[in-house]
Amino acid sequence: MRRRAPGAEHGQVTEIIPGLPMSPLEILALLAALALVTARWLPPAARPRATIAAGAVLVPCAIALGAAGVRWQLLPVLAGAALASPFALAPLLRPLRRRTGRPAWRARWWLALPGSAACVGLIATGPVAAWAFPVPVFPEPSGGFAVGTRVVQWTDPHRPETFTADPNDLRTVVVQLWYPAGKIPAGAQRAQYLGRTAQEARTVSGALARGVGLPGFLVDGVPRARSRSVFDAPVAGGGERFPVVLFSPGSGGVRTQNTAWAEELASHGYVVAALDHPYDSAAVVLADGRTIGTETASSGDRDKDDELAAGWTAVRAGDLGFVLTQLDALERGGIADPLTGRLDTGRVAVTGHSMGGAAALQAARQDRRFAAVVDLDGYPHGPTTPALDRPTLALTQAITPDSDPRYLPRLTEALDSSTAPSYRLTVPGAAHLTFMDGPLYLPPVPSLVGTLGRTGGPRTVAAATLAFLDSVLRDKPGDPAGALRSYGDLTVHRPGTPG
């Protein structure tokens, strides 16, 4: 039986309506603005009533939205209404003008028509902009568990921080856990996306936007979003021990960038631990309130960048191994935690997106505790030895003339040299950002987020990941190739057999 949290924000007028890019308040303001423009063209007797009704709706909506923090997408709507107001209010002022002896003013229709058209065009840009840059609405996880989440911070006493000159600075990582949850209290609020608090979400969102050269206001809907999990929800009952999946984000990415994917896995009985890598992730907010920005940057020289990327990948691989050690201590009771006794640290997969995928491959080469690897469209930076001896799934977009010509040969080399069965699944219609939450909130430009739709990409990537993990971690009967083929074009790399 599925157990879901009836989020307290459901029904509130500031909540985005699933399937629509605007909230009820924003839609009311949009309709009122359009009514204000069209009032000028109604029969004379109806104009005053229409204007008063439109204003009675628009003004309270504008005030409420301003108090909650108006999105930039609604500014053209309010601007269009403001420009239309003098024309709409003119009929209401005629009686006053007559009493004062001043002549009544009314714009000629041939002057008012272009103005009205301009106002309608301005108002229409609001919903178009909201559609292009929406507040992300996360897909409902399909598994049998509700999903809980929380954030922990761990410092490795054996590793100095290599990004700073302070010899006493030790490597610290921030980890977000998504896990199968039990009964969630009625009215529990869904977790903030991108951070533990609204302020952290805004900080991270702004850093992500700067990292790709976008003005922060364009994606101001992202820190407003809430996911499908609930912070600090009770762990699911029954005593079952859950397989563990570690995740490393892309270069400049953050621990929450694959939240939809993580929630889907957790709803099917996995514990997902996603890392922020300080000085590499766009912004890492520590428990003491400090924010660490990214210090990694390309040089523009390909050979130098390959060397830099290999070094950054090695640091990430060390982070992944350290977090697995902490999770193992947590499981054994060495760290007091509600998940103690519920983690199956004998069944652990290491995963990542982009550079995080490269880090996952390196972590598996270095640490035999990882039983499987999932690389989400990641170029294999760093050494190619020793050979992988764990089942590996590489999900990629289609290779095109614009792809890095070194990517496929290097990935194929890694998979061909593996001493365990490995798989490369090419997802039709995918782009690089299909493999994270990007399609939920970025403009639906195929070269940017693919052609699978807002939720289609994240769902496909999660389903393929589950098909693989269920087979290699849970010993689901049958060859995983059979299940994987339903999600794209599959190449199977078996030991000693070229792909």
Image (tube, rainbow, N blue to C red):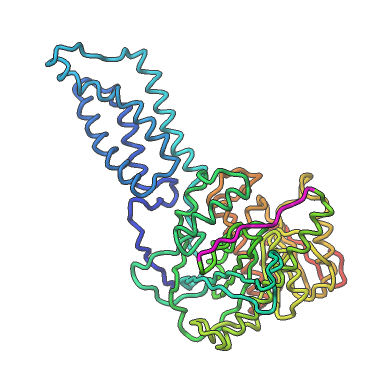
Query: Which residue is rendered at x = 58% and y = 44% of the image?
Result: 214
Is 295 covered by the magenta stretch? yes
Left or right? Give the position of 203 relative to 294: left
Q: Is residue 476 visible?
A: no
Q: Position of residue 57 (x, y in %)?
A: 26, 39
Q: Main secondary structure of the magenta part?
A: loop
Q: Position of residue 476 (x, y in %)?
A: 64, 77
Query: Which residue is rendered at x = 55% and y = 69% of the image?
Result: 176
Q: Which residues are magenta?
A: 289-300
Is 220 covered by the magenta stretch? no
Q: Quadrant of the C terminus?
A: bottom right
Between 93 and 202, which is closer to the camera in this rendering? 202
Between 287 and 228, which is closer to the camera in this rendering? 287
**Quarter occupied by residue 354:** bottom right
Name the residue furthest left. 99
Q: Position of residue 231 (x, y in %)?
A: 45, 69
Query: Which residue is rendered at x = 54% and y = 73% of the image?
Result: 152
**Quarter occupied by residue 113:** top left
Left or right? Give the position of 147 relative to 102: right
Query: Which residue is rendered at x = 80% and y = 64% of the image?
Result: 382
Between 212 and 225, which is closer to the camera in this rendering? 212
Q: Quadrant of the N terminus?
A: bottom left
Between 101 and 12, which is closer to the camera in this rendering? 101
Left or right? Give the position of 132 relative to 115: right
Q: Is residue 333 visible?
A: yes
Q: Position of residue 154 (x, y in %)?
A: 59, 75
